[in-house]
Amino acid sequence: MPLFAPVRVRGGRHRLRRLVRHRRGVVAAGLAVTAAALVAAGPQPGADGPDPGRVRGHPVADQVRERPGPRLVAAPVRIADAETVRLLGPGDRVDVVATGDTGEASVVARGARVTKVPEPVDGAAGGALVVVSVERATAHRLVGAGTTGRLAVTLC
């Protein structure tokens, strides 16, 4: 058999070695491919569908439902001492106290927020009106306490 020079495939191994030696080029190429993939996965302008602004490949998350808090209602309350009502303003927190015929006092509403203090009307019954924001069940207790006794407020 005759002697001849070995056959070499041109540049195969040398290109790989050159890429490994020049890491910056490899990192730059990887970043370019990643950026192209992100642009391709982004929202398509003018896309028709149920949600044109939605990014492809990402599931639509359900909206987080807020936990329903206590349902508040506005309850008008007639306070026996009109001068005390003059000290109140919207946003104040008050405890509403009921006194019965026996002289016993009981707290009917705790931490009720004053929403409105209407101007006194000439010739109105004794006391002054205050509108407070409370839960529905507390509003029912306020109405019942206001019909059977006198109501007073304390600032919180």
Image (tube, rainbow, N blue to C red):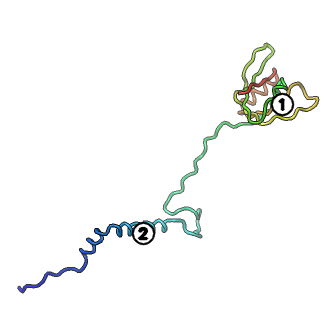
Q: In the rendered view, does 33 fall on the left or right side of 144?
A: left
Name the quarter where the C terminus is drawn. Answer: top right
Q: Please, is residue 61 above or below residue 69 in the view? A: below
Residue 98 position by quadrant = top right
Name the quarter where the N terminus is drawn. Answer: bottom left
- Sequence-wise, which precedes: disc 1 or disc 2? 2
Q: Residue at x 35, y 70 (%)?
A: 25
Q: Nearer the viewer, residue 68 or 32?
A: 32
**x and y percentages locating residue 152 in the rendered image:** 79, 23
Which amino acid type corresponds to the residue marked 2 in the rendered image?
A: Ala
> Mark number for residue 129?
1
* Cα distance in 3D space between marks 1 and 2: 71 Å
Q: Residue at x 84, y 30 (%)?
A: 129
Q: Nearer the viewer, residue 107 or 31?
A: 31
Q: Residues within 10 Å of mark 2 (few under 14, many from 20)?
A: few
Residue that extends furthest to the top in the rendered view of this protein: 102
Q: What kind of element bears circle 2?
A: helix
Q: Nearer the viewer, residue 2 or 28?
A: 28
Residue 10 position by quadrant = bottom left
Q: In the rendered view, does 110 fall on the left or right side of 23?
A: right
Q: In the rendered view, does 125 fall on the left or right side of 15?
A: right
Q: Which residue is mark 2?
A: 32
* Residue depth check, mark 1 versus mark 2: number of the one nearer the observer: 2
**x and y percentages locating residue 38 in the rendered image:** 47, 65
Q: Residue at x 80, y 36 (%)?
A: 116
Q: How many marks?
A: 2
Which amino acid type corresponds to the residue marked 1 in the rendered image?
A: Leu
Q: What kind of element bears circle 1?
A: strand
**x and y percentages locating residue 49 in the rendered image:** 58, 65
Q: Residue at x 72, y 31 (%)?
A: 93
Q: Nearer the viewer, residue 4 or 55?
A: 4
Q: Please, is residue 17 above or below residue 58 in the view? A: below
